[in-house]
Amino acid sequence: MNNRKRKKLPKRLAAAAGDGRVALLQRLLAQGADPDTRDPDGATPLYLAAVQGENRCAELLLAAGASPNAESRGWRSGLPLAAATAKANLPLVELLLCHGADPHLRESGGGSALAWAQGWSDGAEERQAVLARLRNLTV
């Protein structure tokens, strides 16, 4: 891979993860892309996959060694587990927890995944399932 392509790699990796482009993500990771590299705005590919509900991309990134506790910086700051919790994406919450995501870890803004879940006022079934799962970890 030449230097020009290498410089664009973080942006391409993040875009592939957030857009659900599984084949491209697989190819970039196979070429040696760092799964924790931040895009020019400071977002990690795993965080973008979590925000967009791209569970398969998140699975690939975690398998490639992405840290489930790496926080994105800048205007898209946040933790993957908090993003999955905010989306009430229980399968992704489970996947992140299985890879060592810390439900007590606080984002730079002060909130944690558990805080997101406890702040919900509606009783949507998916939200309550996520809250119950996170609460089971704190007992």
Image (tube, grey):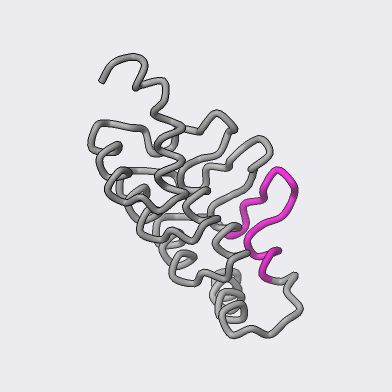
Q: Residue at x 52, y 48 (%)?
A: 47
> What secondary structure prevails in the magenta region?
loop
Q: For residue 92, which quarter of the picture?
A: bottom left
Q: Residue at x 74, y 46 (%)?
A: 109
Q: Residue at x 46, y 32 (%)?
A: 11
Above or below — where is 126 with respect to 67? below
82 on left or right of 25: right
Residue located farthest toward the top when viewing the structure as drawn: 3
Percent position (x, y) of residue 88?
Answer: 57, 71
Percent position (x, y) of residue 21?
Answer: 36, 50
Percent position (x, y) of residue 103?
Answer: 58, 60
137 on left or right of 24: right
Front position in the image: 82 or 30: 30
Magenta part of the chain:
103-117
Front position in the image: 42 or 110: 42
Front position in the image: 136 or 93: 93
Percent position (x, y) of residue 74?
Answer: 66, 35
Front position in the image: 112 or 14: 14
113 on left or right of 46: right
Quarter of the image that includes the C terminus: bottom right
Above or below — where is 102 with respect to 44? below
Q: For residue 124, which quarter of the picture?
A: bottom right
Q: Is residue 126 magenta?
A: no
